[in-house]
Image (tube, rainbow, N blue to C red):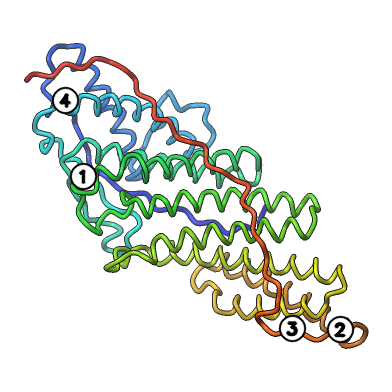
Amino acid sequence: MTTMMQYLIPEPKTKEILFEKTLQSAGPVTLEEVKDLSAKRKVIEESVNKTSKVTDATTIGLTSACEQDLHRLRQYLPLLFNLVHYTDKIKRVSNLKIRWSSGLISQTLIQRTCPKFFQVDNIMFELGMVRFVYAVKLRERAMELVSTDFKNSVTVYREASGVFHHLSHELLPSLQLCLPPGKLPELTSPLCSCLSLLCLAEGQAVTTENAEESGRSASLLSKLHFGISQLLSEAYSLLSSRPNGEYKDLSTRFLEYVTTMGALHELKSQKHLAEVLESEDRVGEAIGVLRRALAAAKKSTPSKDDKWISIFKKEREEVAKNMAKYEKLNDSVMLQKIPIDREIPFPKGVKIVNLIPYIPTRLERELRFKS
């Protein structure tokens, strides 16, 4: 599968946390647990900061770096979730210095090499950011699997969507008051809801591409492509409708990806709708659909990414070729009137990919801290 647009979500960066230096363990068992937490946190820190130099023994046998990262996150998250259970027993959280930077804020070259870190004195901040990284890594893994195992790729997109949805609806509402406003979009409900929908759209795009290769009907393909476009339109509206320009500093490349991908699938949808109309001898309407589609596509051509530009250009050329063919047929044989804009049929969308709910796991271990 080569015709899919792709975009890697930039990961947030973090600073070291040594839990045992701040948390006053009451006894050697808790001290060992807390040290284990620090060790597992260290490999996550090295992974997101791209400073890791060695492969730890537990990840040997996992083929991709992304799989290794997911394995490490699955080891750290249950231990961290267990610590959250004891939040009310933890003193001096500020001494932990839980610091993260955003990967999704538009940055200059200097800011990319020296990102701005924000400290939030709340264990839930750490849990939120690490779960966000987990969702980003699941989505990255789904992208890796597209060309080799499309069914598994769709499943992993659905899992990523579930984690983003969990963040948006379960974890983040209670955390909003202690976050610096506008600085960490990763931990805002609208952005996580947007990413949840994006993963569903991408999962449906994989399914649709497979349906194209399997020779499914133009009617079904039109509906599937338009369903993708609807999901992306909904995702974009979650960010663009926010008051006070809440997302004005959000990465323009990310926003362009969402809008361009939506426009691409709307174009594909109308191409297939025109095929259906032509097969029913409604050539005038088919020409109207393609004229409208090309006019809309002209406004949505991507500006920066060469791969995206070539994918979009190829699709536009194919639609223009079909239109020329239909116009020739109409001029010589059918002689049908081209309907005015409001009379031109519009595609109908179907959504067939749903999220897999994320159920956090906690490694239940008793922790005792000095009061």
Sequence-wise first label, 1 or 3? 1
Label 2 amino acid?
Answer: Asn
Label 4 amino acid?
Answer: Glu
Sequence-wise first label, 2 or 4? 4
Mark 2 against mark 4, which lies toward the viewer? 2
Q: Is residue 96 left or right of residue 157?
A: left
Task: Confirm or deny contact between disc 4 and disc 3 (CB under 8 A).
Answer: no
The residue labelled by disc 4 is 20
> Where in the figure is residue 333, as x and y percent of width and height?
93, 84
Sequence-wise first label, 1 or 2? 1
Mark 1 against mark 3, which lies toward the viewer? 3
> Where in the figure is residue 28, as x and y percent of width and height?
17, 11
Residue 360 or 252: which is nearer the viewer? 360
C-alpha span from label 1 to label 2: 65 Å
Sequence-wise first label, 1 or 4? 4
Q: Report helix, strand or loop for mark 1.
A: strand
The residue labelled by disc 2 is 330
> Where in the figure is residue 77, as x and y percent of width and height?
35, 30
Neighbours of disc 3 within 10 Å: few (<14), some (14-19), many (20+)? some
Q: Report helix, strand or loop for mark 4.
A: helix
The residue labelled by disc 3 is 339
**Residue 101 showing in the rendered view:** yes
Q: Is residue 327 above or below residue 133?
A: below
C-alpha span from label 2 to label 3: 13 Å
**Residue at horizontal 84 percent and vertical 84 percent from the top:** 336
**Mark linked to residue 134:** none
The residue labelled by disc 1 is 99
Sequence-wise first label, 4 or 3? 4
